[in-house]
């Protein structure tokens, strides 16, 4: 985490609150979190790596709370859903090229820490990462994120490599004459 100078403590608190608020139910809270993140990234009080680490903590806390093993210290009003990350992060990326680079770094860090059970929740974020990488003509640099993306399939419950076509799909792929008796 690079949060230099006397702003370190305040910036880390703002980053942690913003990361938690990106997934909040209240749109006003998400808008405020976007404004804070844009300001912190523009002043370089923190970079995308620091915000990515905060998002990873939110992702990990969400996994623990949904498994029933832990609770948030502060239980927010409304539901915290990681699926809501895409829209605030897209607005941050639209603020400028520096912020877009930082959002790409954030998303790479999140995908590097994501598990196979997080695929559906992160579908919008993966699409945003794809668009940012294509716009900037920049590849995903984190090796762990690349390996997660290689297994990614938004509709499958299992990784892509383990998917087998269903009998119904296999029947659709076979030519219609395969079912006819041979005339020879």
Image (tube, helix red, strand yellow):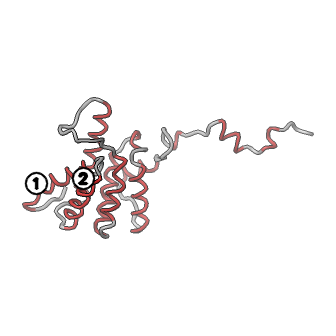
- Location of residue 106 with respect to 169 vertically, above or below: below
Quadrant where the N terminus sits is bottom left
Please identify the quarter of the rendering in which residue 96 is found: bottom left
Residue 35 % position (x, y): 23, 61
Please identify the quarter of the rendering in which residue 43 is found: bottom left
Residue, disc 2: 29
Residue at 79% x, 41% y is 178
Residue 58 - label: none
Residue at 20% x, 54% y is 15
Residue, disc 1: 9
Residue 60 % position (x, y): 28, 41
Q: Nearer the viewer, residue 28 or 39?
A: 28
Label 2: few (<14), some (14–19) or many (≥20) C-alpha neighbours in 10 Å: some
Please identify the quarter of the rendering in which residue 58 is found: top left
Query: Which element is circle 1 on?
Result: helix
Asked whether, in this view, residue 14 is left or right of residue 127, the answer is left
Quadrant where the C terminus sits is top right
Label 1: few (<14), some (14–19) or many (≥20) C-alpha neighbours in 10 Å: few
Residue at 32% x, 57% y is 88
Query: Which element is circle 2 on?
Result: helix
For the residues carrying marks 1 and 2, which lies nearer the camera in this image? 2
């Amino acid at each position: 985490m690079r949060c230099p100078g006397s702003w370190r403590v305040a910036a880390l608190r703002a980053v942690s609150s913003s990361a938690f608020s990106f997934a909040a139910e209240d749109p006003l809270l998400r808008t405020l979190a976007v404004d804070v993140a844009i300001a912190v990234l523009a002043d370089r009080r923190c970079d995308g790596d620091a915000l990515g680490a905060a998002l990873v903590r939110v992702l990990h806390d969400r996994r623990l709370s949904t498994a029933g093993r832990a609770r948030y210290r502060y239980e927010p009003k409304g539901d915290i859903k990681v699926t809501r990350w895409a829209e605030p992060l897209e607005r941050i990326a639209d603020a400028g090229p520096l912020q877009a680079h930082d959002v790409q770094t954030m998303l790479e860090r999140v995908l590097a820490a994501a598990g196979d059970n997080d695929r559906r929740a992160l579908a919008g974020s993966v699409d945003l990462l794809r668009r940012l990488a294509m716009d900037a003509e920049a590849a995903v640099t984190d090796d762990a994120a690349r390996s997660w993306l290689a297994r990614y399939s938004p509709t499958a419950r299992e990784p892509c490599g383990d998917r087998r076509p269903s009998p119904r799909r296999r029947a659709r792929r076979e030519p219609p004459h395969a079912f006819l008796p041979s005339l020879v």
